[in-house]
Structure formats: C-alpha cells, structure tokens
Amino acid sequence: MLTQTLLRTFLAYNHQANAILLCHFAALTPEQGQRATAISHGTALELIRHMVDTLSEEALAETIDVGTAQGGSPRYVRRWQIFLHLVNHSTHQRSELSRYLEACGHPVAERDLDFLNFVVRMESTEC
C-alpha cells in the first residue's frame, strides 16, 4: 500500500514537471500549439488539456467500477489508484510533449523533469 508521503511526493513532482512543460508550451505560437502532430491527443494543446485534469479529495476516496464501463464484468478500484495511474501515465505524455517542444525550437532540459532532481530540491528546502 502506498504511504501518504509517497503519493504526495509523486503528486508534487508531477505538478512541478507539468508546470515546467506549461512554461515551455507558452512559448509556442498558437499554430504550433494546435498543429496536428503524431502525439497522443493529436495536438500539444489537447495533450496539455488532458494532462492537467485532476480529481477532488472526495472523489479520491470513492471506489468505482472500471469493468462494466468497458463492457466487461464489474472490477472495482479506488479512485486514488486511477489518479496514480494518471500521474504515472503523465510521464509518458511529458516525454511526448517534450520531444514536440524540442522539434518546435523550445527544448526542455532533461534535468528539469528528472524525479531525483525534484526530490533533492524538495528535501533541501525542508526544515
């Protein structure tokens, strides 16, 4: 079972890494942001929209059926597990978006998105 500390650290990292990409995304022209490209969700703008969707604390506590929604038999998971999947999947999506931003002339430094660099920075600012 995940501890609250682990989940909070991973969520904080996800938030920071996404914020870095949003800063680089802001440097794109409107045409570059909306250009159809070979990344998931079709355009950088749509991928950004997908990446920043979040759930409330109340929703995290709920158990939901993910099996029936896909036409199968009931399979129950906690929403926090889905949320952790979203955070983990964002790693892939940040990679896609980072490659696209680099192709558009707005590269993101790998160290800016590195989880261990994030943890070191976070721990150095704690009391």
Image (cartoon, rainbow, N blue to C red):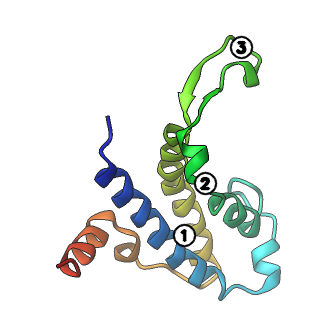
Q: CA distance from mark 2 to mark 3?
A: 27 Å
Residue 69 falls in which quadrant of the image? top right
Mark 2: which amino acid? Ser
Badge number at residue 98: 1
Q: Earlier in the sequence, mark 1 or mark 2?
A: 2
Relative side of 103 to 91, left or right? right
Disc assigned to residue 72: 3
Question: Sequence order check: which comes first, mark 2 or mark 3?
Answer: 2
Going by the image, does 87 lie left or right of 114? right
Residue at the image point whose x is 39% and y is 77% from the top = 112
Quadrant (top left/top right/bottom left/bottom right) for the N terminus: top left
Q: Secondary structure at mark 2?
A: loop
Q: Quadrant of the C terminus?
A: bottom left
Instruction: Look at label 3 and name its amino acid.
Output: Gly
Q: How many marks?
A: 3
Quarter assignment of residue 26: bottom right
Nearest the eye: 75 or 21: 75
Which residue sits furthest front?
58
